[in-house]
């Protein structure tokens, strides 16, 4: 069914490429969606920033926002389109013209923070509006893959894990027996932090979180239920308060 629509759309597209966008849309009712219910998308046979959308049997020609292209599949950034660096256009024509605004090269995109190569922050642009976003604790933004990464994977751009974590791993087996228990990946507590600890991986410190439901037990350097770690009861209380506040916001 998909191949049938693609073949018909390809033929139609060859006839209407010289028309304006409005004229192209007007020509589309000649083609029928193979499925009359649900939402399906199909790549434009010639253009990488356009695609065909079937919504409950209605076919429309859609264009991706500036900085986005169409590839189909899951994980779309906005309206079935993905960031341009994540799309292989194949033989489809690709024309990327930035529509820049303050902090944004394209209307949609992810950009490194001005703090430098080893920054735990990045800028996310949506509709040309820039928003500063923080990476999870212990990670730094990798401009080459456009996501947060372990800083020890970014030494080629001048970033080190020690810069991000403020911790230096010992060169040998730690003298502390609790930390040494986890050799060759020794663990260390973070003073005053009940939710995260440091694990040394190949000599590089990495901040590891216990997740939403557990806390760090300093005596064992493992993640445990909050009620089993007396000095971390406040974490459970804070989380319960946060849940109540979210529920209250939804009901108001």
Image: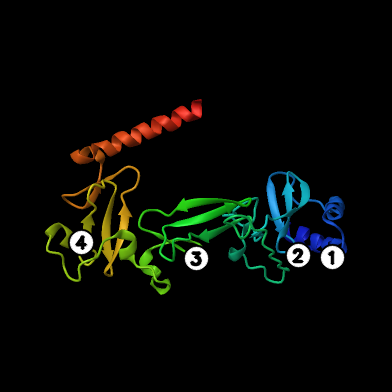
- Disc with the residue nearer the chain's start (2 vs 3): 2
- Disc with the residue nearer the chain's start (1 vs 2): 1
**Which residue does the numbered mark 2 point to in the structure image?**
45
Residue shown at 48% from the left, 29% from the top: 249
| In the rendered image, the vertical position of residue 172 relative to residue 132, given as above or below | below
Q: Residues within 10 Å of mark 4 (few under 14, many from 20)?
A: some
**Which residue does the numbered mark 4 point to in the structure image?**
182
Could you say which is closer to the camera, residue 121 or residue 12?
121
Disc ID at residue 14: 1
Which of discs 2 and 3 lies nearer the camera? The answer is: 3
Q: Secondary structure at mark 4?
A: loop
Tell me if label 4 and label 1 are in contact, CB under 8 Å. no
Could you say which is closer to the camera, residue 2 or residue 204?
204
In which quadrant of the rendered view does residue 178 lie? Answer: bottom left
**Which residue does the numbered mark 3 point to in the structure image?**
143
Could you say which is closer to the camera, residue 178 or residue 207?
207
Tell me if label 1 and label 3 are in contact, CB under 8 Å. no
Judge from the rendering whether residue 223 lies leftward or rightward of residue 158; answer left or right. Answer: left
């Amino acid at each position: 069914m998909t191949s049938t629509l693609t073949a018909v759309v390809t033929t139609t597209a060859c006839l209407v490429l010289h028309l304006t966008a409005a004229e192209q849309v007007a020509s589309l009712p000649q083609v029928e969606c193979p499925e009359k219910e649900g939402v399906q998308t199909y790549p434009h046979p010639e253009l990488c920033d356009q695609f065909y959308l079937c919504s409950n049997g209605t076919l429309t020609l859609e264009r991706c926002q500036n900085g986005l292209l169409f590839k189909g599949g899951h994980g779309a950034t906005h309206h079935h389109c993905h960031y341009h660096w994540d799309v292989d256009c194949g033989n489809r024509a690709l024309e990327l013209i930035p529509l820049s605004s303050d902090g944004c090269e394209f209307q949609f995109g992810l950009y490194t923070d001005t703090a430098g190569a080893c920054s735990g922050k990045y800028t996310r642009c949506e509709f040309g509006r820039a928003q500063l976003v923080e990476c999870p604790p212990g990670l730094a933004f990798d401009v080459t893959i456009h996501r947060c990464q372990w800083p020890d994977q970014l030494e080629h751009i001048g970033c080190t894990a020690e810069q991000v974590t403020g911790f230096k791993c010992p060169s040998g087996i730690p003298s502390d027996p609790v930390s040494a228990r986890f050799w060759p990946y020794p663990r260390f507590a973070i003073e005053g932090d009940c939710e995260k600890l440091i694990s040394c991986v190949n000599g590089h410190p990495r901040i590891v979180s216990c997740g939403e439901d557990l806390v760090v037990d300093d005596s064992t350097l493992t993640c445990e239920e909050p009620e089993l770690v007396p000095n971390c009861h406040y974490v459970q209380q804070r989380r319960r308060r946060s849940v109540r506040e979210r529920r209250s916001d939804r009901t108001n």
